Image (cartoon, grey):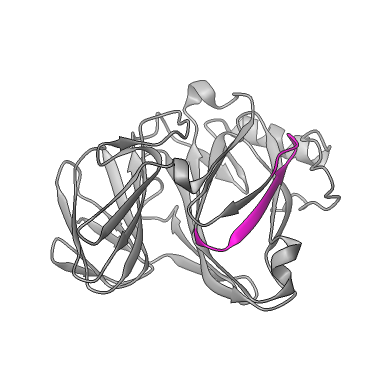
Amino acid sequence: MTLLINPRTHDLGGFEVRRAVPTLQARSVGPFVFVDHMGPAIFEKGTGIDVRPHPHIGLATVTFLWSGTIHHADTLGYSQDITAGDVNWMTAGRGIAHAERTPLSLREGEHPLHGMQTWVALPKAHEETAPEFHHHAAATLPQFRRDGVWVRVIAGRGFGEESPVRVFADTLNVALDLDPDAELSIPPSHAERALYVLEGEAQLDGANIPPRHLAVLDAGAVAKLRAKTPLKAMLFGGEPLDGPRHLWWNFVSSSKDRIEQAKDDWRAGRFGTVPGDAEYIPLPER
């Protein structure tokens, strides 16, 4: 292990989000340019998350939950609940807008939410691809349980399995759940790899990894993960980016001019509207 990163924490009114990537130490890991840990949280009756419609270009958003439900709706007309173990993969490409909200039915009582949302930068050849949305139910993901370890391949390939989620570059994205004292060898299967510990006490090659921290793994080396307590973690990485990326608000691109165009498109309403949702997040003035 070469690097341990303590993410920045944002309190969104009793709901914490920790941003592990990008940081000064890790601008990206493989194609991942943005890694957020949401929760864990218990929302009170009548409350939930309400992320109003907002735009994206040049990336794919990947949502995976350990608990709770989020409703996704977008300008393509898709309307989909994601629950624990499912995968939502939204390819923004040349442009899409979406909203993420807690379903009304859940707001009738207390309800949990805990998960990860990541952004994958699209290769230059695919930055302007047509936008798409794909939902993959938990049962469709490759997974196995062995010696106290539960492995689920969210996207890309890992541990001899390959996810049905369409990716645009060699990708590693795996959910890990370990019982106390369980161990897992992480092979050097991809050029860049990192492990984020959502919950629990872990050791990596004998060194302690606190919960809610990101460990960037040594390239080309097997890493030995051990759970000291029940552990939830996400392993991610893959093929390095094919050049620098600019990130501004919700836009990712290899071109600064393209980001300026996206700003103009959002101001002018050219991204379209999310059916049934008249709200939107204005372009930040910064």
Q: Main secondary structure of the magenta part?
A: strand
Q: Nearer the viewer, residue 128 or 230?
A: 230
Position of 274 with respect to 71 (left or right) is right
Name the one closer to the observer, 127 or 173.
Answer: 173
Relative to residue 51, is residue 66 drawn left or right?
Answer: left
Looking at the image, residue 234 lies above or below residue 128 = below
Residue 119 position in % (x across, y down) = 51, 45
Q: Measuring 47% from the left and 66% from the top, which residue is drawn there?
A: 8
Q: As drawn, is 97 to the left or to the right of 234?
A: right
Side of 14 where 273 appears, left or right: right
Question: Is 56 within the magenta?
Answer: no
Q: Nearer the viewer, residue 167 or 262?
A: 167
| Residue stretch in magenta | 66-79
Is residue 75 or residue 265 the one in the foreground?
75
- Count of all numbered marks drawn on residues in the image: 0
For the N terminus, the quadrant is: bottom left
Q: Quadrant of residue 264?
A: top right
Q: Give above or below for 97 relative to 202.
A: above
The image shows residue 111 at horizontal and vertical percentages of 62, 72
Taking the magenta stretch, the answer to whether it contains residue 69 is: yes
Find residue 187 and report its horizontal and vertical position in percent.
Answer: 19, 44
Which residue is outermost to the top? 125
Residue at the image point whose x is 43% and y is 43% from the top: 32
Please tell me which residue is depicted at 65% across the width and 75% down the height of the picture. 13
Residue 213: x and y in percent read: 35, 65
